[in-house]
Image (spheres, helix red, strand yellow):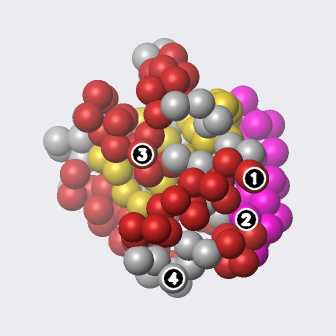
Amino acid sequence: MSAEKLKQHKIIFVVGGPGSGKGTQCEKIVQKYGYTHLSTGDLLRAEDTVLDMLRDAMVAKADVSKGFLIDGYPREVKQGEEFEKKIAPPTLLLYVDAGKDTMVKRLLKRGETSGRVDDNEETIKKRLETYYKATEPVIAFYKSRGIVRQLNAEGSVEEVFQQVCTHLDCL
């Protein structure tokens, strides 16, 4: 099966800062809507490798998946453009928007049990700074296409998921 078949599937970019709740919301979308969750944070960072791995993973699941959640991608406009050339354009970009204080608090809490060395306050603040610099142009790029759906991620998991459902039920 070729990547051509992927153009018939819903593809949703899921963007949000570290600790915004992207992964949690993706898990809930998978359960309710039958999408396949692909987290680019789990893939290698070399760009062509990431795109090839994403395409291969998507093609492998195309017959059984109702759509794809591309978690944490694109991190730059150029990545989004490359994704569209190699795979397909996104149907939607879900912007999981939590305030800086909320994300820091969530990451510190996660750090208590995750064992991740990057879940400490100094590293978190640097990651957030990098995230904002890189992601603002991405959001603006896709807003100009009218496909960004901004979620207020300050509430509970369920409150945020209600917003997600409002947007996905329309697809």
Residue to which mark 3 is pinned: 24
Q: Is residue 124 above or below residue 65?
A: below
Residue 129 or residue 76, whichever sits in front: 129
The quadrant holding residue 104 is bottom right
* Quadrant placement of the N terminus: bottom left
Question: Cα distance, mark 3 to mark 4?
Answer: 20 Å
Q: Earlier in the sequence, mark 2 or mark 3?
A: 3
Query: Could you tell whether 131 is left or right of 2 in the image?
Result: right
Residue at image point 61% right, 41% down: 96
User: Given this view, does label 2 or label 1 mark the residue nearer the observer?
Assistant: 1
Does dot 2 land on a helix, a strand or a loop? helix
- Amino acid identity at mark 4: Val
Residue to which mark 4 is pinned: 117
Query: Could you tell whether 143 is left or right of 115 in the image?
Result: right
Residue to which mark 2 is pinned: 128
Residue 157, position as x, y percentages in the image: 47, 34
- Amino acid identity at mark 3: Thr
Question: Cα distance, mark 2 to mark 1?
Answer: 7 Å
Contact, CB < 8 Å: mark 3 with mark 1?
Answer: no
Question: Cα distance, mark 2 to mark 3?
Answer: 18 Å
The quadrant holding residue 82 is bottom right
- Amino acid identity at mark 1: Lys
Residue 34, position as x, y percentages in the image: 26, 34
Residue at image point 67% right, 48% down: 102
Contact, CB < 8 Å: mark 2 with mark 3?
Answer: no
